[in-house]
Amino acid sequence: MNRVTTRLGGLALLVLLGCLPLLAIPVPGVLPGYTYEPGTLQLLALCWLTAALALSYHLLFGVAGLMSFGHALYFAAGIYGLAIVLDRTDVPLLPAAALVLVGGVALAFVVGAISLRVTGISFAMVTLAFAQAGNVLVRRDQGDLTGGEEGLALATDGVPAALVGVVNTRNLYWLALVVLLFVYLVVLWIERSRAGHVAAAVRENEVRVRIIGGRPYLTKLVVFVLAASLATVVGMAYLLLQSGASPATSTADFTLTLLVMVVLGGVGSRWGAVVGAVLYTLLDQRLAELAHSEAVAGLPAVLRIPLSEPMFLLGTCFVLVVLFLPGGLAGAAARLAARRRPGSDQDGSGPASGVPAPEGAVA
């Protein structure tokens, strides 16, 4: 019954999100206007794509336990790959996207095959090195392909007219929502597949998996390539939404932002990754306006200076979540639900809270 209720609730939420461009719903302090306005739809579409990207990183970090510092490389590969193909060729959008996806898979396979030869912090450093190399190539604009620091504008000749321009922001919103749903279903399928179960076992004890005849390296490589492929798909949708490519999307800092989103929502939780990404994106956008508001400008310097920096505010929120909400937002929601179950202690100290009873105690 709980599973059916959850599925019906998820379907209802999806229908509501799909209808938002047709509704005039204001959310003061969160959204810049009514839900049908282009500025609001642009922000929400960015939230959905960021959530999809966080889900792809959840597959890598939360499922397989691989802390990569270079996941932005494949996101940028989708952005710049599609931008370059559309700019330098006359290939339509869908064949160009298929070509870029094949390139993203090949890139992920090569990088993963090399990086996964090591584990732990060494793996993280190798992925960071590859990501930094990609960022250098983007910024140096080899062969006048990437536009350097100025980025690369989207060539719209091969893009359907329904996906171009402010007047079509509604269509881009729906595209972003479809991408999020697609990534979520793929991640769900992988987690419940044999490869997903083996990846979770490798995360817990790689030596034991090897002893019982498993192939940890191959399993991690498959998950690595799948996560990178999903990031490439999200990157192509991001290019259409933003109408251009920026070198900021290829930096290691961007991957660290994904890590913050996953930790904020709750490591190991699909919904946690989605909620963490949406919350982070909204805070990032709205806190920037708060930082430059008249209310902050009128404060004393000791408060005005830190509050005028959005990253300071985001960092403070993250620290508070880590300190007071272990397990992220998903963990807090699970503990709250456990306390409300019949027979559980209201103070959360009983068996339903996950805290073991003292030895010899009567349940």
Image (cartoon, rainbow, N blue to C red):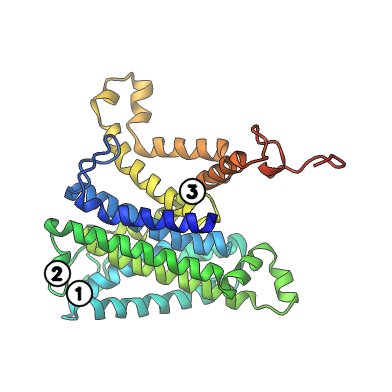
Q: Which residue lies furthest to the right in this view?
A: 360
From where the camera sits, is residue 165 visible? yes
From where the camera sits, is residue 151 visible? no
Q: Is mark 1 on a helix, strand or loop?
A: helix
Q: How crowded is mark 3: few (under 14 residues within 10 Å), some or many (20 or more)?
A: many
Q: Distance between the residues labelled 3 and 1?
A: 36 Å
Q: Which of 113 and 94 is in front in this view?
A: 94
The answer to whether 184 appears left or right of 138 in the picture is right
**Circle number at residue 19:** none
Say above or below: 258 vs 315.
below
Point out residue 138 in the picture as x, y percentages from the top left corner.
31, 65
Residue annotated with mark 3 = 265
Answer yes or no: do the residues labelled 2 and 1 have beta carbons within 8 Å? yes
Question: From the image, which quarter does the N terminus lie in?
Answer: bottom right
Nearer the observer: mark 3 or 2; the answer is: 3
Choose top left, top right, bottom left or bottom right for residue 300: top left
**Circle number at residue 156:** 2
Residue at 33 percent of width and 25 percent of height: 304
**Circle number at residue 86:** 1
Label 3 vs 2, first from the N-terminus: 2
Label 2 vs 1, first from the N-terminus: 1
Count every numbered label the image shows and give the total: 3
The three-letter code of the residue at mark 3 reads Gly
The three-letter code of the residue at mark 2 reads Thr
Q: How far apart are marks 2 and 1 (CA)?
A: 8 Å
